[in-house]
Image: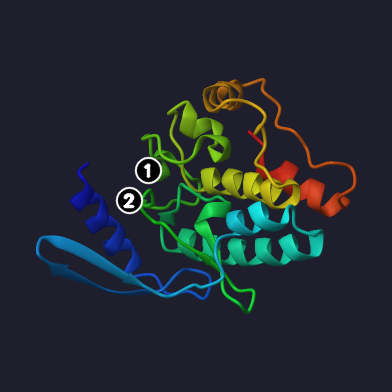
Amino acid sequence: MDEYSRLEREVDLLKNLEHPNIVGFLGTALTDNVISIFMEYVPGGSISSVLNRFGPLPEKVFALYTRQVLEGVAYLHENRVIHRDLKGNNLMLMPTGVVKLIDFGCARRLNRLTHSGGNSDLLKSVHGTPYWMAPEVINETGHGKKSDIWSIGCTVFEMATGKPPLAHMGKMAALFYIGARKGLMPPLPDDFSEEAKSFVKACLIR
């Protein structure tokens, strides 16, 4: 897919989305063969930039952010959209502490939803960022809403520890490890609450 088609698809998704935890789409302009996309201004920077500057977040803080991410993702899934690239770098902060999901370049709209989550709900192209990618994405066995949940678990781990799971590995090694059926994902350290550890564990179930 060329860059124009990718932007066109991203705009097509964004213009139909409206939620407090999703960056607002304001419009587009074409000048001198350059396409500009105008988005809501989010001045607080990304969660990733906050982690780089201040280190891991206190549990009370990342719990607040996680709730907002879940609300934004729930809205996407209700509208048959999967983000496919959830991570700290794609979560922006308003000065008020409101989280905004950004970067819908990898997002796709599912053709049809079924209560059983059958094959019509699955995509098979590889998109995302290695450390946050679900096994079914890596293995190209078909992925849907569950792949976003996996990425949320990795993002909570990132907020809690400052880095995503398996960050000590190279990208390719991490991909092979996640893709292996027997590759267990690391849990949150013991100094976090049982609720936080259980949440991450539940997100990272294969």
Task: Name the residue furthest front.
Answer: 53
For residue 185, side relative to residue 147 (left or right): right
Picture coordinates of residue 121, whole percent (x, y): 41, 45
Instruction: Give the residue at x 40% y 34%.
Output: 126
Q: Residue 127 or 199: which is nearer the viewer?
A: 127
Residue 76: mark in rendering = none
- Label 2 and label 1: CA atoms lie apart by 7 Å
Instruction: Give the mark, 2 or 1, whose residue is nearer the N terminus.
Output: 2
Picture coordinates of residue 131, whole percent (x, y): 57, 36
Say which element carries label 2: loop
Note whether 143 is above or below 72 in the view shown.
Answer: above
For residue 35, side relative to residue 22 (left or right): left
Residue under pointer 2: 111
Instruction: Give the residue at x 52% y 76%.
Output: 20
Q: Quadrant of residue 58?
A: bottom right
> Does the CB distance between marks 2 and 1 fall below 8 Å?
yes
Q: Quadrant of residue 183?
A: top right
Q: Quadrant of the C terminus?
A: top right
Q: Residue 174 or 168: which is nearer the viewer?
A: 168
Q: What amino acid is labelled 2 in the image?
A: Asn
Q: What amino acid is labelled 1 in the image?
A: Ser
Instruction: Give the residue at x 34% y 66%.
Output: 14
Residue under pointer 1: 120
Picture coordinates of residue 10, whole percent (x, y): 30, 58
Note whether 53 is above or below 132 in the view shown.
Answer: below
Say which element carries label 1: helix
**Label 1 environment density (alpha carbons within 10 Å; few <14, some 14–19, many ≥20):** some
Instruction: Give the residue at x 79% y 42%.
Output: 188
For residue 112, side relative to residue 30 (left or right): right
Task: Name the residue furthest right.
Answer: 191
